[in-house]
Image (tube, grey):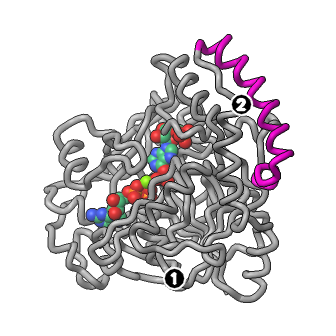
Amino acid sequence: MSAFIVLGAQWGDEGKGKMTDYLAETAEVVVRYQGGNNAGHTVEVGDKQYKLHLIPSGILYDDKVNVIGNGVVVDPKALFEEMDYLEGLGIKITPEKLVISDRAHIILPYHKILDSLKERSRGKNDIGTTGKGIGPCYTDKFERCGIRVCDFIKPEVFKDKLMENIVMKNDYITKVLNGSPLDFNEVYEEYTKYAERLKPFVQDISVRVYDEIKKNKNVLFEGAQGMLLDIDYGTYPYVTSSNTTAGGVCNGVGIGPSMITNAVGIAKAYTTRVGKGPFPTELFDETGNWIREKGFEYGVTTGRARRCGWLDLVILKTTARVSGLTSFAVTKIDTLAGLDKIKICVGYKFEGKVIDYFPASLEDLAKCEPVYEEFQGWDNSVAEARSYDELPENAKKYLKKIEEFTGVKVSIVSVGPRRDQTIKVGDI
Ligand code: GDP
Ligand code: IMO
Ligand code: MG
């Protein structure tokens, strides 16, 4: 039995979708535990590309159970659009293949409106959210006025809770944020249809996942976003509203830590970030643009250009600690191929010392100056490598540096977007 986590080690978009798809081959159950359709996970199988947002990447297999945990926020409209998109590509989605927690919170139209109006009111201090209503939905969860799946699928309960929320939100939207009010009947009518369609997929997923693990099934927990977007350990307030670190699994699924065997951190061979907020190794020069174009660094969910920079080992070391990583999967080393020299950040100069941890205060972080080590590059033949031995020597040195600095082994190296462009180096 194994129950292992696949999580983003940087600011998201590290290749979690690809690695989940690759590792799901050995798993029977794939579980999302936090986030929502702010995520954009790309999986390439053969000549087909799939873009997943809310549905676990295991859905592409016929024989996996895919679970949306209670820690996830579910936009039913987006969920059904994604289901229809996948079914259009020939992927069958049945209640046997997809299970949704009765405790997950529902994203409603006012969450999306609030997301955009609040961003507007933040002015130049906006976060650069995906606009999917994620933050406002988690706010309601903690404010204790959220609507859970179990309430949503009971028309009378949903009606009362929706009425209460719409009255409250309309007040805030019109009086504080200068927006237009929502019509209760319109929302109720549209969303009760979604609720009806959702019903067959709903289960107590804590019981389900626990039982699967007890039956010795292999369970993969697919993270969304990345370590530095974590609400507690990320670059607050430029973060998402959930725990993206390994700790998010226990609360987001309803299982204990002793049931989790491994945690694989997915790390891109360089660093990217979408949205606002600090980024110590960001490149503003031609090299940054070159990496963006070569790696096609554009958001899957919003299409925004991703900011690009050198690999930052301070970040990876922090992720290794906070999530108790058992190994790293390093992706996109083929993207760096062709560069003469490649830099890695091995510490921050801060107040006269060199530190190797990520400071909490954004003011302190702004004072941090990355300390770099320079590496020799490698060529495009790296994309053809199918074993560790076939990797260019310089790429091996690069990977060794990651292991040495973080104290965590690299178990997988990804040299291209496809399933077959993956090299297993060691145990996860
Ligand atoms: P996720 O959000 O972590 O699942 O990552 P995204 O799907 O947002 O972004 C990663 C992108 O890189 C996707 O387009 C993947 O197909 C692609 N990708 C993943 N691994 C590799 C790799 O090793 N090499 C290359 N060139 N592309 C990769
Ligand atoms: P995957 O799973 C990269 C970023 C947004 C914004 C911040 C808050 O594909 O790695 P939110 O809408 O969550 O309130 O936005 O978080 N963000 C992501 N960046 N990859 C993601 O997901 C992201 N999900 C959210 O750009 O900066
Ligand atoms: Mg993504």
The reply to whether residue 231 is in sight is yes
Q: How many marks?
A: 2
Indicate the secondary structure of the residue bearing disc 2. Answer: helix
Q: Position of residue 159 (x, y in %)?
A: 81, 40
Say above or below: 336 vs 179. Answer: below
Task: Tell me if mark 2 has few (under 14), some (14-19) or many (20+) residues whose alpha carbon lies within 10 angstroms of its own.
Answer: some
Q: Is residue 337 magenta?
A: no
Indicate the secondary structure of the residue bearing disc 1. Answer: loop
Q: Which residues are magenta?
A: 149-178
Residue at 73% over, 81% down: 213
Instruction: Please give left or right for residue 223 compared with residue 193 in the image.
Output: left
Q: Nearer the viewer, residue 128 or 4?
A: 128
Q: Position of residue 81 (x, y in %)?
A: 50, 54
Task: Tell me if mark 1 has few (under 14), some (14-19) or many (20+) residues whose alpha carbon lies within 10 angstroms of its own.
Answer: few
Q: Which mark is residue 267?
A: none
Say above or below: 24 vs 153. Answer: below
Ligand 3 in which quarter: bottom left
First in sequence: mark 1 vs mark 2: 1
Residue at 30% over, 49% down: 297
Instruction: Please give left or right for residue 28 compared with residue 354 in the image.
Output: right
The residue indicated by pointer 2 is 184
Q: CA distance from mark 1 to mark 2?
A: 39 Å
Q: Which mark is residue 62?
A: 1
Say above or below: 133 vs 268. Answer: above
Q: Is residue 154 magenta?
A: yes
Some atom of ligand 1 lies within 8 Å of the CB belonging to the residue at label 1 = no
Q: Nearer the viewer, residue 205 or 316?
A: 205
Amino acid beneath label 1? Asp
